Image: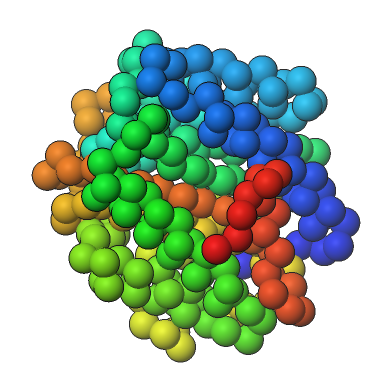
Amino acid sequence: MIVLKNKQEQAIMREAGQILAEVLATLEKMVLPGVTTLELEEKADKMITEAGAVASFRGQPGMTVNAPPFPAATCISVNEQVIHGIPSNRVIKEGDIVSIDCGVTWRGFIADSAISVVAGKADPDVDRLVSVTRKSLLAAIKTALPGRHLHDLSFAIQSWAVNEGLGIVKDFCGHGVGRSLHEDPPIPNYGKPGTGPLLRPGMTLAVEPMFNLGTGKVKMLKDGWTVVTADGKPSAHWEHTLLITDGPAEVLTWRPGEVEG
Ligand code: MG
Ligand code: MG
Protein backbone atom coordinates (compact mmCIF):
# COMPACT_ATOMS: atom_id res chain seq x y z
CA MET A 1 0.00 0.00 0.00
CA ILE A 2 1.36 3.42 -0.94
CA VAL A 3 1.15 5.83 1.99
CA LEU A 4 0.43 9.45 0.97
CA LYS A 5 1.85 12.13 3.28
CA ASN A 6 -0.26 15.08 4.42
CA LYS A 7 1.06 18.66 4.45
CA GLN A 8 2.36 18.38 8.01
CA GLU A 9 4.18 15.13 7.27
CA GLN A 10 5.57 16.61 4.07
CA ALA A 11 6.96 19.54 6.06
CA ILE A 12 8.76 17.14 8.42
CA MET A 13 10.17 15.14 5.51
CA ARG A 14 11.37 18.39 3.94
CA GLU A 15 13.31 19.11 7.15
CA ALA A 16 14.70 15.55 7.22
CA GLY A 17 15.79 16.03 3.62
CA GLN A 18 17.62 19.25 4.42
CA ILE A 19 19.49 17.71 7.35
CA LEU A 20 20.58 14.87 5.09
CA ALA A 21 21.50 17.20 2.24
CA GLU A 22 23.87 19.12 4.52
CA VAL A 23 25.52 15.87 5.60
CA LEU A 24 26.07 14.66 2.04
CA ALA A 25 27.26 18.09 0.85
CA THR A 26 29.89 18.00 3.59
CA LEU A 27 30.98 14.43 2.82
CA GLU A 28 31.13 15.20 -0.91
CA LYS A 29 33.93 17.71 -0.22
CA MET A 30 35.78 15.26 2.05
CA VAL A 31 36.14 12.60 -0.66
CA LEU A 32 39.83 12.99 -1.50
CA PRO A 33 42.72 10.54 -1.78
CA GLY A 34 43.88 9.60 1.74
CA VAL A 35 40.54 9.80 3.56
CA THR A 36 39.19 6.58 5.06
CA THR A 37 35.58 5.53 4.67
CA LEU A 38 35.37 5.44 8.47
CA GLU A 39 36.30 9.15 8.63
CA LEU A 40 33.40 9.91 6.28
CA GLU A 41 31.10 7.78 8.44
CA GLU A 42 32.16 9.49 11.66
CA LYS A 43 31.52 12.95 10.19
CA ALA A 44 28.06 11.90 8.99
CA ASP A 45 27.18 10.34 12.32
CA LYS A 46 28.32 13.44 14.23
CA MET A 47 26.36 15.83 11.99
CA ILE A 48 23.18 13.75 12.24
CA THR A 49 23.44 13.59 16.03
CA GLU A 50 24.18 17.31 16.32
CA ALA A 51 21.09 18.06 14.23
CA GLY A 52 19.02 16.10 16.77
CA ALA A 53 18.19 13.47 14.17
CA VAL A 54 18.79 9.72 14.06
CA ALA A 55 20.84 7.70 11.57
CA SER A 56 18.16 5.58 9.88
CA PHE A 57 20.47 2.90 8.51
CA ARG A 58 22.05 1.81 11.79
CA GLY A 59 20.32 -1.35 12.97
CA GLN A 60 18.52 -2.09 9.70
CA PRO A 61 18.08 -5.87 9.47
CA GLY A 62 20.19 -7.75 6.92
CA MET A 63 18.70 -9.54 3.95
CA THR A 64 20.25 -12.89 4.75
CA VAL A 65 19.73 -14.86 7.96
CA ASN A 66 23.31 -14.57 9.20
CA ALA A 67 23.83 -10.89 8.30
CA PRO A 68 24.16 -8.69 11.41
CA PRO A 69 22.05 -5.51 11.67
CA PHE A 70 23.68 -2.69 9.65
CA PRO A 71 26.37 -1.19 11.91
CA ALA A 72 26.72 2.38 10.58
CA ALA A 73 25.02 5.65 9.64
CA THR A 74 26.26 5.48 6.06
CA CYS A 75 26.74 2.85 3.41
CA ILE A 76 30.01 3.58 1.64
CA SER A 77 30.72 1.57 -1.48
CA VAL A 78 33.99 1.93 -3.39
CA ASN A 79 34.62 1.13 -7.09
CA GLU A 80 33.15 -2.33 -7.84
CA GLN A 81 31.07 -2.12 -4.68
CA VAL A 82 27.54 -1.14 -5.74
CA ILE A 83 25.68 -0.49 -2.48
CA HIS A 84 25.63 -1.36 1.24
CA GLY A 85 29.39 -1.12 1.79
CA ILE A 86 30.33 -0.95 5.47
CA PRO A 87 32.63 1.95 6.50
CA SER A 88 36.10 0.77 7.49
CA ASN A 89 39.77 1.80 7.66
CA ARG A 90 40.00 1.50 3.88
CA VAL A 91 42.00 4.42 2.51
CA ILE A 92 40.56 6.09 -0.59
CA LYS A 93 42.94 6.31 -3.54
CA GLU A 94 43.18 8.66 -6.51
CA GLY A 95 40.45 7.82 -9.03
CA ASP A 96 38.28 5.73 -6.66
CA ILE A 97 34.50 6.08 -7.01
CA VAL A 98 33.07 6.57 -3.54
CA SER A 99 29.31 6.05 -3.32
CA ILE A 100 27.86 7.36 -0.08
CA ASP A 101 24.28 6.49 0.85
CA CYS A 102 22.72 7.93 3.99
CA GLY A 103 19.33 8.09 5.69
CA VAL A 104 18.13 10.47 8.37
CA THR A 105 15.14 10.07 10.67
CA TRP A 106 13.67 13.35 11.88
CA ARG A 107 10.53 13.47 14.03
CA GLY A 108 9.58 10.00 12.85
CA PHE A 109 10.12 10.51 9.13
CA ILE A 110 13.01 9.43 6.92
CA ALA A 111 14.88 11.00 4.01
CA ASP A 112 17.20 8.84 1.91
CA SER A 113 19.84 10.05 -0.55
CA ALA A 114 23.09 8.92 -2.15
CA ILE A 115 25.96 10.48 -4.09
CA SER A 116 28.86 9.04 -6.08
CA VAL A 117 32.06 11.06 -5.98
CA VAL A 118 35.39 10.37 -7.65
CA ALA A 119 38.43 11.08 -5.46
CA GLY A 120 40.85 13.27 -7.38
CA LYS A 121 41.26 12.67 -11.09
CA ALA A 122 38.83 10.24 -12.70
CA ASP A 123 39.42 7.82 -15.52
CA PRO A 124 37.22 9.07 -18.44
CA ASP A 125 35.05 5.93 -18.41
CA VAL A 126 34.50 6.22 -14.67
CA ASP A 127 33.66 9.89 -15.06
CA ARG A 128 31.08 9.03 -17.72
CA LEU A 129 29.60 6.26 -15.55
CA VAL A 130 29.16 8.62 -12.59
CA SER A 131 27.74 11.49 -14.64
CA VAL A 132 25.36 9.35 -16.72
CA THR A 133 24.00 7.66 -13.60
CA ARG A 134 23.28 11.10 -12.13
CA LYS A 135 21.71 12.29 -15.38
CA SER A 136 19.35 9.32 -15.31
CA LEU A 137 18.22 10.37 -11.83
CA LEU A 138 17.60 13.93 -13.04
CA ALA A 139 15.61 12.53 -16.00
CA ALA A 140 13.48 10.49 -13.60
CA ILE A 141 12.88 13.58 -11.45
CA LYS A 142 11.64 15.53 -14.50
CA THR A 143 9.29 12.66 -15.32
CA ALA A 144 7.84 12.51 -11.80
CA LEU A 145 4.65 14.43 -12.55
CA PRO A 146 1.17 13.70 -11.18
CA GLY A 147 -0.77 11.49 -13.55
CA ARG A 148 2.33 9.82 -14.97
CA HIS A 149 2.94 6.16 -14.23
CA LEU A 150 5.73 5.06 -11.91
CA HIS A 151 7.47 3.04 -14.59
CA ASP A 152 7.75 6.16 -16.75
CA LEU A 153 10.48 7.08 -14.24
CA SER A 154 11.97 3.61 -14.49
CA PHE A 155 12.02 3.90 -18.28
CA ALA A 156 13.67 7.34 -18.13
CA ILE A 157 16.45 5.82 -16.00
CA GLN A 158 16.80 2.74 -18.18
CA SER A 159 17.05 4.83 -21.37
CA TRP A 160 20.22 6.54 -20.16
CA ALA A 161 21.90 3.22 -19.39
CA VAL A 162 20.86 1.67 -22.69
CA ASN A 163 22.00 4.67 -24.74
CA GLU A 164 25.37 4.73 -22.99
CA GLY A 165 25.92 0.96 -22.96
CA LEU A 166 25.96 0.71 -19.16
CA GLY A 167 24.69 -2.19 -17.07
CA ILE A 168 21.56 -1.64 -14.97
CA VAL A 169 21.53 -3.27 -11.53
CA LYS A 170 18.16 -5.02 -11.47
CA ASP A 171 18.46 -6.91 -8.18
CA PHE A 172 17.98 -3.69 -6.17
CA CYS A 173 15.64 -0.77 -6.67
CA GLY A 174 14.24 2.48 -5.28
CA HIS A 175 11.28 2.59 -2.94
CA GLY A 176 8.66 4.68 -1.23
CA VAL A 177 9.97 6.27 1.97
CA GLY A 178 8.37 7.91 5.01
CA ARG A 179 7.83 6.48 8.47
CA SER A 180 9.68 3.42 7.19
CA LEU A 181 12.90 3.35 5.19
CA HIS A 182 11.36 1.02 2.64
CA GLU A 183 7.72 1.59 1.78
CA ASP A 184 5.68 0.76 -1.29
CA PRO A 185 6.08 1.09 -4.18
CA PRO A 186 9.31 -0.59 -5.30
CA ILE A 187 10.86 1.60 -8.02
CA PRO A 188 12.82 -0.50 -10.51
CA ASN A 189 15.53 1.15 -12.58
CA TYR A 190 14.04 -0.32 -15.74
CA GLY A 191 10.48 -0.71 -16.96
CA LYS A 192 7.77 -0.16 -19.52
CA PRO A 193 6.31 3.35 -19.92
CA GLY A 194 2.64 3.65 -19.03
CA THR A 195 2.78 0.88 -16.42
CA GLY A 196 3.01 0.84 -12.63
CA PRO A 197 1.02 2.91 -10.13
CA LEU A 198 -0.20 6.40 -11.07
CA LEU A 199 1.82 9.16 -9.42
CA ARG A 200 -0.27 11.19 -6.97
CA PRO A 201 0.51 14.29 -4.90
CA GLY A 202 1.72 13.30 -1.43
CA MET A 203 3.74 10.28 -2.56
CA THR A 204 7.34 10.33 -1.31
CA LEU A 205 9.75 8.29 -3.38
CA ALA A 206 13.42 7.40 -3.03
CA VAL A 207 14.62 7.06 -6.61
CA GLU A 208 18.06 5.47 -6.92
CA PRO A 209 19.67 4.42 -10.19
CA MET A 210 22.63 2.03 -9.93
CA PHE A 211 24.63 1.59 -13.13
CA ASN A 212 27.73 -0.50 -13.85
CA LEU A 213 30.48 -0.04 -16.40
CA GLY A 214 30.14 -3.75 -17.21
CA THR A 215 27.07 -5.94 -16.90
CA GLY A 216 24.28 -5.29 -14.39
CA LYS A 217 24.98 -8.57 -12.58
CA VAL A 218 25.88 -8.31 -8.90
CA LYS A 219 26.77 -10.58 -5.99
CA MET A 220 26.97 -10.18 -2.22
CA LEU A 221 30.15 -10.40 -0.18
CA LYS A 222 30.46 -12.73 2.82
CA ASP A 223 29.79 -9.86 5.24
CA GLY A 224 26.11 -10.24 4.28
CA TRP A 225 25.87 -6.59 3.20
CA THR A 226 28.30 -5.39 0.56
CA VAL A 227 26.92 -5.78 -2.97
CA VAL A 228 29.60 -5.86 -5.69
CA THR A 229 29.54 -6.15 -9.47
CA ALA A 230 29.90 -9.75 -10.61
CA ASP A 231 32.55 -8.78 -13.20
CA GLY A 232 34.52 -6.51 -10.83
CA LYS A 233 33.95 -3.41 -12.97
CA PRO A 234 33.04 -0.05 -11.38
CA SER A 235 29.55 0.96 -10.30
CA ALA A 236 27.81 4.26 -9.49
CA HIS A 237 24.75 5.11 -7.40
CA TRP A 238 22.76 8.33 -7.01
CA GLU A 239 19.57 8.83 -5.01
CA HIS A 240 17.14 11.57 -4.08
CA THR A 241 13.93 11.57 -2.07
CA LEU A 242 11.12 13.21 -4.07
CA LEU A 243 7.72 14.52 -3.10
CA ILE A 244 5.10 14.24 -5.83
CA THR A 245 3.12 17.49 -6.00
CA ASP A 246 0.46 19.02 -8.25
CA GLY A 247 3.32 20.19 -10.48
CA PRO A 248 6.99 19.24 -10.85
CA ALA A 249 8.31 16.91 -8.15
CA GLU A 250 9.91 18.58 -5.16
CA VAL A 251 13.36 17.15 -4.45
CA LEU A 252 13.53 16.99 -0.65
CA THR A 253 17.25 16.15 -0.61
CA TRP A 254 18.78 18.70 -3.00
CA ARG A 255 22.19 19.56 -1.58
CA PRO A 256 23.07 23.22 -1.04
CA GLY A 257 24.62 24.45 -4.27
CA GLU A 258 23.73 21.28 -6.18
CA VAL A 259 23.43 22.19 -9.83
CA GLU A 260 20.43 20.75 -11.61
CA GLY A 261 21.22 19.27 -14.99
MG1 MG B 1 19.71 5.26 0.10
MG1 MG C 1 17.03 4.09 -0.80
| Residue 183 locus on image (x, y percent) | 57, 56
| Residue 102 locus on image (x, y percent) | 55, 36
- Quadrant, the N terminus: bottom right
| Residue 195 locus on image (x, y percent) | 44, 84
| Quarter of image, res 9 | bottom right
Furthest toward the left, the residue is: 231
Q: On the picture, is 231 further left or further right than 257?
A: left
Image: 107 above or below 174 = above
Furthest toward the top, the residue is: 89
| Residue 68 locus on image (x, y percent) | 39, 23
The residue at 57%/68% (across/down) is 141
251 or 185: nearer the viewer: 251
- Quadrant, the C terminus: bottom right
The residue at 37%/11% (across/down) is 89
Q: On the picture, is 105 further left or further right than 171?
A: right
The residue at 55%/30% (across/down) is 29
Image: 95 above or below 250 = above
Residue 208 in view: yes
